[in-house]
Image (spheres, helix red, strand yellow):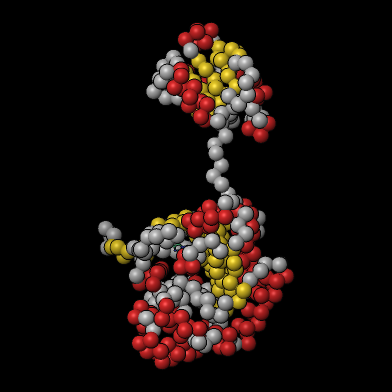
Amino acid sequence: MFADVVEGAGYGQLIPPLLEDLGVFTRIGDATDVVTKEMYDFVDKGDRHVALRPEVTASVCRSFAQHRPTVPWKVYYSGPNFRYEKPQRGRYRQFDQVGVEVLGVDDPQLDVEVIALAWEFYRRLGLTQVRLVVNSLGEPDDRARYVEALRDHFLAAGTGLSEQSRATLERNPLRVLDSKREPDGAFIASAPQIASFLSAEAAAHFDDVQRGLSALGIPFAVEPKLVRGLDYYRRTIFEFQGGTLDSAQNALGGGGRYDGLVEALGGPATPGVGFALGVDRTLLACDDEGVFPARPVELDAFVVDVTGGLQATEITAVLRAAGFAADRGYDNRSMKAQMKLANRSGAHVAVIVGDDELAAGTVVVKPLRTSSDQAPIARTALIDHLRTVTDASSTPSTGTDIT
Ligand code: AMP
């Protein structure tokens, strides 16, 4: 479904590697927990220091810097990431993300486009309790001045701040805003806000993004204290929060602009914007909201073979090749045991072969969802017969007869 949404907007699939040179990630921010504390890195047999990717954006930018595709480069990806975290509901050491990245476009309307794509994805899933929050971190200079003001503010709090936040403050004052620890709350509430540090250009960019979202009718809230886990973001940042999830793990996904990242990875100065959505948390939200229930496998036929099993092998293979969903019993179990499995499978019909049928070149087709009579038919007529008894939706347009 994600691929449908983004391919429909001109994005092509990229499959970045799970393993990258460590430098790809250390260059994106050595003040970032994801890089300093949570990365699985090791030295390989060729003495290369490599890492299992903790996120995908850096790999996409590395790939761009290496291959220099024409811009705008609009790509999407899906797959696992690895972070050494304390596992709990919604936080795993291996988790899946889907995401998009666009390189080479500075236009705020593109920020709106990527946000709208994620929004559309959640809408198609049927999620209704997703909240969009947005913020701007300004240009690098704005951000640097803001970080200094934050540092002064939190230093003044002294030992009033939690011990963990005092440690975070030394590395990265912005991340203190993310703290959910009780003693930090009051200092975070009174902290300076980025809005008063934005340059005219950054403020105009942010206004345009908000106007675009409003034009599309996408509800959002400006959250002045929103920061993101990775440090490479500039200007627009956003997060999708699941209304049903615990607040510590309620981020379903997020993203933003990272205009300096390609440069940091050895490429030309290139604007970039994108997002990553956590698949595991999105599925938790789907469970909580009762949408997107797992679809039971809809079987057309369940093959019951009491002649040893080889006939079931042949018949299921031919049925499957003709486009029918077919399953079977194994282990040469009794007729009664196999019929029990057939009934439990929810299939339209049981296709039964015993010694008599095998000798006569027939099968017995027994409807399982209605009380109609079971009928012996020639094996050569089975596919045509199944077409008449299964739903039009599961009926293939072509098929081969069993001979
Ligand atoms: P991030 O790359 O940190 O911005 O994360 C983007 C999204 O990935 C988050 O909003 C989560 O939905 C998901 N995510 C991040 N870390 C984890 C994790 N350890 N376990 C499960 N999902 C995660």
Q: Is residue 311 above or below residue 122?
A: above
Point out the residue furthest to the right here. 215
Q: Position of residue 330 (x, y in %)?
A: 42, 24
In front here: 345 or 325?
A: 345
Q: Looking at the image, which residue is at 58% across and 85% down?
A: 195
Q: Position of residue 237 (x, y in %)?
A: 55, 73
Q: Is residue 198 above or below residue 43?
A: below
In front here: 224 or 237?
A: 224
Q: Is residue 184 above or below residue 71?
A: below
Q: Looking at the image, which residue is at 51% across and 25% down?
A: 342
Q: Position of residue 375 (x, y in %)?
A: 61, 14
Q: Looking at the image, which residue is at 64% across and 30% down?
A: 396
Q: In the rendered image, which quarter contains the C terminus?
A: top right
Report how many numbered discs are placed on residues in the image.
Answer: 0
Q: Position of residue 138 (x, y in %)?
A: 56, 82
Residue 92 lies left or right of residue 109; in this view the side is: left
Q: Can residue 69 be seen here? A: no
Q: Hey, which quadrant is residue 45 in on the image? A: bottom left
Q: Can residue 134 be seen here? A: yes
Q: Looking at the image, which residue is at 56% across and 88% down?
A: 197
